[in-house]
Amino acid sequence: MDKAKQGRVIVIAGPSGVGKGTVIGALKALRDFRVSVSHTTRGIRPSEADGVSYHFVTREQFRALVDEGLMLETTCYQGNYYGTSRTAVEDALALGQDVVLDIEVEGARNVRRAFPDAIEFFLLPPSMEALERRLRGRNSGEDEQTIQGRLAQARVEIACAPEFDYIVVNDVAQQAAADISGCLCALACRAEERAPLAERVLAGETITL
């Protein structure tokens, strides 16, 4: 690894059901990074595992983490609280690891304030119809009112997409992951990022990225 490499915060946001977790899974086949596992007070779904999908906690436990200053960002979505551990992110960055955060729009705004250099992606569904199919097909056991609430919230969040650095359409997860990886590669190769490498080559070093 290049000794000048620094860890980066990479935000992947988008409406519920857009496929953030699936895209992040596909991205792991292309790049090396640590995924930050968020905390949430919502109930666990049949397809999820505690500590893998989320850290599932009670509202009292969540409030205690916030009160102790241990959360980087928090947000309330559909009546449930979500948040990212500050310590987990900072520890990974200190080791030079990139950290990917799977969060909602309001959470992304909070991260933006804490890490102005964070690289933020917004995932769009190919259509609202496709998003609704995904919400209904993920075996969450949610009732019609909850699904309609998620769709209404999705419209609000999609209108916020221009706030982000990049917008990626998630029609096929592997392609969306490739698009994100390509953006990160281009960002890392900018002259302002790589200019110090030229001086090191001239000084006789061999660069290993």
Image (cartoon, rainbow, N blue to C red):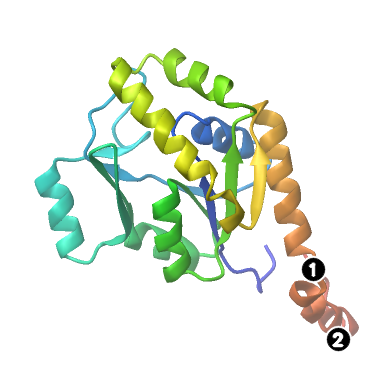
For the residues labelled 1 and 2, the Cα–Cα distance comes to 21 Å
Asked where in the image residue 169 lies, by quadrant, the reply is: top right
At x 43% / y 15%, what residue is drawn? 136
Q: Nearer the viewer, mark 1 or mark 2?
A: 1
Q: Position of residue 166 (x, y in %)?
A: 66, 52
Three-letter amino acid code at the position of disc 2? Ala
Three-letter amino acid code at the position of disc 1? Arg
The answer to whether any part of residue 209 appears in the image is: no
At x 44% / y 33%, what residue is drawn? 16
Asked where in the image residue 3 lies, by quadrant, the reply is: bottom right
- Give above or below for 66 relative to 131: below
Residue designated by label 1: 190
Q: Residues within 10 Å of mark 1 (few under 14, many from 20)?
A: few
Residue designated by label 2: 203
Q: Position of residue 131 (x, y in %)?
A: 53, 24
Q: Nearer the viewer, residue 118 or 193?
A: 118
- Give above or below for 30 relative to 100: above
Q: Position of residue 50 (x, y in %)?
A: 28, 32
Q: Position of residue 69 (x, y in %)?
A: 22, 66
Q: Does 129 sit left or right of 46 as displayed?
A: right
Classify mark 2: helix, strand or loop: loop
Q: How many marks?
A: 2
Classify mark 1: helix, strand or loop: loop
